[in-house]
C-alpha cells in the first residue's frame, strides 16, 4: 500500500526548525553558562523556543494551505508580522538574561505582557481572516445557487420548446424574462435569506419534474399548470430580491 509522503517544503521547514532549536540551546548554554540555575535564564530560553515554534508552525501552515492563504493574503501577512515581532522582542529580552534576576518581577511582567499582546492581536487578526474567508465562501455558495437556478430554468425552457403548442410563445416570453431576472439578481445572499434561494431551486425543479411526467404520458400535458408554476416562481424571486434590498 502506498504511503503518504510529506511535501518537500514541510520537510525542509522542519529541518530548519530543528537546527534553529539546537542552535538556540547551544547559544544559551554558551553565553549564559553561569546563569543556568537562574529563573531568568529559563524564562528567556523557553520564551525564545516558544517563539521559534510558533514561527515554524506559521510557516508550515503557509506551505500546506497556499490556496486558503491566497484568499486573504493581507490578513495572514499581518498575523505573520505579529509572530515575527514577538520573536524579535523575546530575542532582545534574552540579551538581558545576565542581570535580569536583579529585577526579576519586572522581567517576568515584561514577558507576560509581550506574550499577551501578541496573543490578543494575533487572535483578532486570525478571527478577522477566518470571518473574511467564511464570508467569501458563503458568497461563492450563493453564486452557485443562483447559477444552478438559472441552469434549471434553461433546462425547463428546452423541454417546453420541444413540444408544439399555442402556449409556447407565451411561456417562452415568461421564461426569458425570468432567466434575465435570475441572471441579474444580486448573488450575495445573507444567511437569513438563503432559504429563499433554496425555495426557488426546489420550485423550478418541481416544475421540471411535472413537465417530465407530462412528456412521459403519466400526467396530462397542461401548459396552464406550467404558467401558474412560473408565476409562483416569479413571485418568490421578487420577494427574495425585495427582502435582499431591505436587509442591506
Image: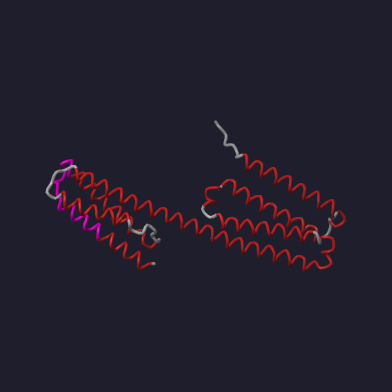
Most foreground residue, 179 or 130: 179
Main secondary structure found in the magenta portion: helix
Quadrant of res 117: bottom right
Residue 188: percent from left, percent from top = 39, 59
Q: Which residue is drawn at 81% across and 48% down?
A: 26
Q: In which quarter of the image is the C terminus?
A: bottom left
222 part of magenta stretch: yes
Looking at the image, which residue sits at the far right? 34
Residue 11: percent from left, percent from top = 65, 41
Q: Which residue is drawn at 29% across and 63% down?
A: 239
157 part of magenta stretch: no
* Left or right of residue 72, residue 50 in this image: right
Most foreground residue, 216 or 1: 216
* Left or right of residue 38, residue 78 in this image: left
Residue 228: percent from left, percent from top = 18, 56
Q: How many marks?
A: 0
Residue extent of the magenta highlight: 214-234
Amino acid at each position: 500500500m502506498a504511503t503518504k509522503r510529506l511535501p518537500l517544503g514541510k520537510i525542509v521547514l522542519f529541518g530548519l526548525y530543528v537546527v534553529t532549536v539546537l542552535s538556540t540551546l547551544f547559544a544559551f548554554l554558551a553565553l549564559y553558562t553561569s546563569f543556568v540555575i537562574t529563573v531568568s535564564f529559563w524564562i528567556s530560553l523557553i520564551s525564545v523556543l516558544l517563539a521559534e515554534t510558533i514561527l515554524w508552525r506559521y510557516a508550515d501552515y503557509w506551505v500546506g494551505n497556499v490556496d486558503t492563504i491566497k484568499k486573504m493574503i493581507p490578513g495572514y501577512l499581518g498575523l505573520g508580522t505579529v509572530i515575527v515581532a514577538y520573536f524579535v522582542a523575546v530575542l532582545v529580552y534574552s540579551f538581558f538574561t545576565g542581570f535580569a534576576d536583579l529585577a526579576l518581577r519586572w522581567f517576568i511582567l515584561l514577558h507576560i505582557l509581550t506574550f499577551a499582546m501578541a496573543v490578543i492581536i494575533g487572535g483578532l487578526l486570525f478571527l478577522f481572516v477566518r470571518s473574511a474567508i467564511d464570508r467569501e465562501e458563503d458568497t461563492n455558495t450563493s453564486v452557485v445557487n443562483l447559477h444552478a437556478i438559472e441552469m434549471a430554468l434553461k433546462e425547463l425552457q428546452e423541454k417546453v420548446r420541444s413540444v408544439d403548442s399555442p402556449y409556447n410563445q407565451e411561456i417562452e416570453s415568461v421564461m426569458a424574462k425570468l432567466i434575465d431576472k435570475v441572471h441579474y439578481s444580486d448573488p450575495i445572499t445573507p444567511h437569513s435569506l438563503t432559504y429563499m434561494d433554496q425555495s426557488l431551486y426546489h420550485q423550478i425543479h418541481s416544475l421540471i419534474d411535472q413537465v417530465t411526467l407530462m412528456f412521459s404520458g403519466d400526467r396530462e400535458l397542461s401548459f396552464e399548470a406550467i404558467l401558474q408554476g412560473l408565476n409562483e416562481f416569479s413571485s418568490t424571486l421578487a420577494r427574495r430580491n425585495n427582502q435582499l434590498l431591505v436587509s442591506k
